Image: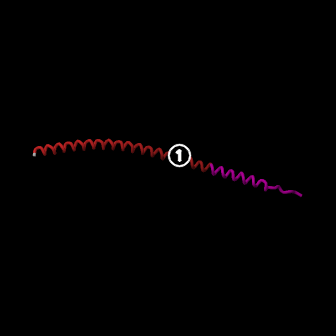
Amino acid sequence: MTTAPNHSRHLPLLSFLFALLLQTVVVVSYFNGVDNRSMVNQSGIERNEGRLDRLEVAVQKQEVMLARMSEHLGAIRQVVEAMNERALNRN
């Protein structure tokens, strides 16, 4: 009488190894995706920092222009008031 080899003992081990391999592939794929997304986010951050720097320069220029306009308006107001006083003194 010959006995057939028992393959049922190897089946759980093969299933376990296959599941372990599959989980390893999934984890590596997941972290690869995380790494790619972080690189995309980093480039987006750098682009936004550049835009922010340009906006800060533009705002500083506008502040200077507003200060100059305010000085000019003050000078115009003084000239108009002086002209008004001269006109009132002549009458």
Which quadrant of the rendered structure holds the N terminus? Answer: bottom right
Residue at the image point whose x is 75% and y is 54% from the top: 12
Q: Closer to the camera, 2 or 18?
A: 18
Lateral position of residue 45 relative to residue 15, left or right: left
> Which residue lies under the disc numbered 1?
39
Q: Secondary structure at mark 1?
A: helix
Total number of numbered labels?
1
Q: Amino acid at mark 1?
A: Met
- Residue 40: x percent and y percent? 51, 47
Name the residue located 42 percent from the left edge and 45 percent from the top edge: 52
**Residue 3: in magenta span:** yes
Report which quarter residue 5 is drawn in.
bottom right
Other residues around mark 1 within 10 Å, as few (<14) / some (14–19) / many (≥20): few
Q: Where does residue 16 sit, x and y in percent of width and height?
A: 72, 52
- Residue 37 falls inside the magenta stretch: no
Q: Which residues are magenta?
A: 1-27
Q: x%, y% of residue 19?
A: 69, 53
- Residue at left offset 50%, top offset 45%: 42
Nearer to us in this view, 19 or 62:
62
Question: What residue is drawn where x is 12% and y is 43%?
Answer: 89
Question: Picture quarter containing residue 49?
Answer: top left
